[in-house]
Image (cartoon, rainbow, N blue to C red):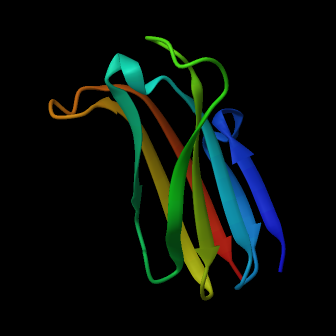
Amino acid sequence: MAEVRLGAGDGNRHVDASAGDHLVVALPESPSTGQSWFVEISKAAIVWLEGEAFDRTGPLVPGGAGTRRFRFLAVTAGEATLSFKLAFAGSGATTDTLTIHIVVR
């Protein structure tokens, strides 16, 4: 099983994976600004979200940055789209988006 690493520069990319592969999407985030990354999976039977975590990259200060990591499992053959939105919690106002297309073979 392989691990495919993706990031902010992989928008609109088509990614080939095999069932059992893991996909890790790492996106820059500053949660103290009130914005966080959220993900929607078009076909959760094909790609599962295994979990997510935030890793701080500097001191804990207002506006401090870090990385939001989403870990997915390619489950079965098919196609799915991962749609990420950087949005303000509560209002849903979106400030950035990222879309990655996954083909599981």
Residue 3 in the image: state x and y as whole percent: 80, 66
x and y percentages locating residue 28 in the rendered image: 59, 29
Residue name at image x 53 percent, y 19 percent = 60
Q: At 50% from the left edge and 56% from the top edge, which residue is drawn? A: 82
Q: Which quarter of the figure is the N terminus placed in?
A: bottom right
Residue furthest to the top in view is: 62
Q: Residue furthest front?
A: 60
User: In the rendered view, does 12 fall on the left or right side of 9?
Assistant: left
Residue placed most toward the observer, 4 or 34: 34
Residue 12 appears at what percent x and percent y?
A: 61, 44
Q: Residue at x 70, y 33 (%)?
A: 9
Q: Residue at x 23, y 26 (%)?
A: 93
- In the picture, the quarter occupied by the C terminus is bottom right
- Residue 16 rendering spot, x and y as whole percentages: 75, 68
- Residue projecting furthest to the right: 2
Decide: is 95 above or below 3: above
